[in-house]
Amino acid sequence: MAKPKLTPAELTKRIEHHLQFTLGEVADKENKQAYWRATCLAINEAVISKLQTTRARQQEKQVKSVNYLSLEYLMGRMLSNNLHNLGVFEAAEKALKNFDMELSDLCEQGADLALGNGGLGRLAACFLDSLATLDYAATGYGVHYQHGLFKQSFDQGRQIEEPDLWREFGSPWEVCRPEAAQLIPLYGHVEHQTQADGSVKSIWHPSVTFKGVPWDVPIVGYNSDTVNVLRLWESRAVDAFNWDLFNNGDYLQAHKTNVQAETVSKVLYPNDEHDAGKELRFIQQYFFCACSIKDIIARHQGLNGVDWAAFANDTAIQLNDTHPTIAIVELQRTLIDDYGMNWNDAWALCRKVFAYTNHTLLPEALEKWSVKLFERVLPRHLEILYHINEEFLNNEVNAKWPHDFQMRAKLSIIEEGAERMVRMAHLCVVTAHKVNGVAEIHSKLVKSDLFPEFDALWPEKLTNVTNGITPRRWLKACNPELSKLISKHVKKDWAKDLDSLKSLEKLADDAKFQKEFMAIKRNNKVKLAEEIESLTGVKVSPDAIFDIQIKRLHEYKRQHLNFLHILALYHRLLENPDMEMHPRVFIFGAKAAPGYHLAKEIIFAINKVADKVNNDVRIKDKLKVVFLPNYRVSLAEKIIPAADVSEQISTAGKEASGTGNMKLALNGAVTIGTLDGANIEIAEEVGDDNIFIFGNTVDQVKAIKASGYNPYDFYETNKELTKILDWLDSDFFTPGQPYELSAIKHSLLDGGDPYLVLADFQSYSDAHHALDVAYREPARWAKMAILNTALMGKFNSDRSIQDYVNNIWQLTPCAE
Ligand code: 26Y
């Protein structure tokens, strides 16, 4: 039986109570922070009580549960999401009116939980939302980083990074659970003890121990019975302070141990799809995996210890990319060393519970750790890893390809070379009972290009689960006006059943509906224009086309292709200011990894060109360019509802899926994109008339590369490309400083243009022209926009989760 929902009166009372007694504040309208906290605390009471009933129910019914292991969670803000999911958003709006407060203002007060870099971290957040919504028992495990992804600002166009202080003003949703702390040993050596029966037993003598303290963030399902938990591990010293050292006068050493321990969860590595191979990151991964494995086992501890048969049947562990791979070895080690299980039983259990999701084919993102580092930090784990590898090569590989040493070398978990390395992805594939890619094309490439031999060995193992997004955050909460319009026409609870939006299809040609739909889009653009002005000082017209590229900055995502096209448009406008073209605002949001030089040069170049273009009266406001600083989930929620055009322009074969593409299309933006990742499936859903596809396909990219790509051919034969690339060497955009923007040109010509920017330029430019023509036919454009919203049902993350459940996890829901 569902509990009665919170009424505005009840909420008002609770907010008042927390304001006065928990926070010790007086009613002061100016103090929005205090009202925000009091509101969170009031809501959290309902959340926690639901969390307790969920836990009791899940324990009582003993359903199978999934443990999602991820180094990243990009949760964003929690207040409005929790209110929507609890179904009390309107009640809270009314309650706050009693204090003369706007709920939407208060929601802005919270900091983003930015414990992730980009797509992979945001996907984890969407999946937690869907798991709770569908009433599955699930625990997210992650790291309680003291500093999440850095805060970005620009200084004269250049990216500046500052630490993210997400807990500075408190973090009302999380609860610390010191009683569930875990001790994590590291380093040391392994002793080999010969037993009475002649066998040799390995005993690990670690030399350092850290403590992992969990913080629980409740995950509220939408209109469901379930509140699950995201458990984040914080590292601490085992003794808060080493009194022995202190009393002996070694004050600094006493302090140093603390600092070392706390360093482990200090900061999220900001590298996205580029492995830096740092020791601290390795320790961070192990620390987090070891804490999580211990916690998963502890949750199965009954009066007579752990029933391992039951454990294997009711536990699934999903590895979000290779980052938590060491959990495999840790579980195998624990079963053998700590619980005395024999090798084969332990290994069978590991193979039964683990599954692995691959999110990228980029070689620089595939993790490898040096054997030397392994040996120093986790000597016992290395032994176990060798054993896993031996058994795999001698039994499974040898059975399929007898005495084939080339095949052994290819498939081995250890890469032989100048420095011997552990291939984490191989360990995942060898162990996992299922390995999935994240979009059809990506999963096909995982089979054909990344792991063809593994696919031959285990034809059932490699599979696909196309990504999805939660429609709660990415439509219902972020686009309230459009949501209201949809609810007027779609009777079902579309935020749960996104396929039901299909019934809007019949309204796509309806003039009245088109008018309403586009009026909402325009309103959202007015709001975004205000935000743009307040963030950058640039005034943009809501009547222009809002053309959006928001994602991490990476060469493969080709923000520089977008940039070159902007230069081309600018050049054309200077030559012919009366050129027929609907005014356009190009909007970027992107963080570059702090050590990624070219990515930062691309940001700088876009900012410099923006300065020039935005102040050039000759082009009569036909073109504006803005780079919004500090792109993050909460900024995405403001940009996406206002988008007309969605830029999804990666080199075919490089973007595993993309999920921003889904969010933008769901909010009525039309995609201009390559046949890459989930763009292909989006095109299948909306039809060729409602998307602008351009560029070389995966097969064409392969052919071009095979025949020896020469970017100079395009530079020399395409006169527009010659002009705009040469422009970058001049001081046109950087008066008195020629060559300041040359890095891009250099990488495209002398650097070999690894992502085929020049090869796709003309086709991209043509697609943009077609798009401009389409926009100038309002009814045609409105129809396209509506159909994009109507046909996104497939990309509900609830569908993704149901695919995981059916094909990988085999869970049953646990509702009241
Ligand atoms: C090894 C380390 C440096 C590393 C850190 C972060 C490697 C990769 C990553 C992040 C990868 C990532 O975000 N991948 C994205 O995953 C999304 C969700 O599946 C996809 O939609 C997107 O195409 C893919 O780039």
Image: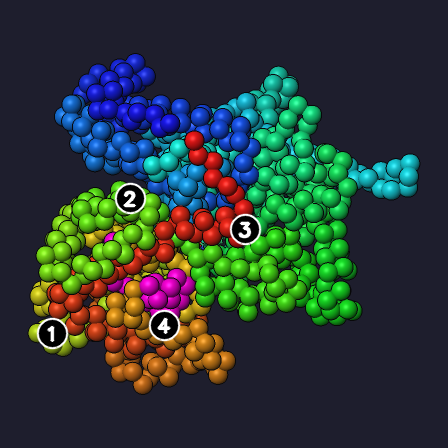
**In the drawing, does residue 371 fall left or right of residue 318?**
right
x and y, in percent, of residue 431 in the image: 64, 52
| Colour pattern | rainbow
Of mark 2 and mark 4, the one earlier in the sequence is 2
Of mark 4 and mark 1, the one earlier in the sequence is 1
Residue type at tag 4: Val
Q: Residues within 10 Å of mark 4 (few under 14, many from 20)?
A: many
Q: Residue at x 45, y 80 (%)?
A: 704
Q: Residues within 10 Å of mark 1 (few under 14, many from 20)?
A: few
As measured in the structure, the alpha-carbon distance from the residue carrying label 4 to the one carrying label 1 is: 26 Å
Task: Establish if 333 lies above or below 31.
Answer: below
Q: Nearer the viewer, mark 4 or mark 1?
A: 1
Of mark 1 and mark 3, the one earlier in the sequence is 1
- Pointers 4 and 1 in contact (C-beta within 8 Å): no
**Highlighted magenta segment, given as a residue range:** 667-685
Residue type at tag 3: Ile
Of mark 1 and mark 2, the one earlier in the sequence is 2
- Dot 4: element: helix
Q: In front: 398, or 562?
A: 398
Is residue 542 highlighted in magenta? no
Q: In front: 129, or 532?
A: 129
x and y, in percent, of residue 36 in the image: 26, 28
What residue would you read off at disc 3? 808
What residue would you read off at disc 4? 757
Examine the rendering and report whether any part of residue 247 can be seen. yes
Task: State yes or no: Cβ of the residue under disc 1 lies below 8 Å from any atom of ligand 1.
Answer: no
As measured in the structure, the alpha-carbon distance from the residue carrying label 2 to the one carrying label 4 is: 43 Å
Residue type at tag 1: Glu
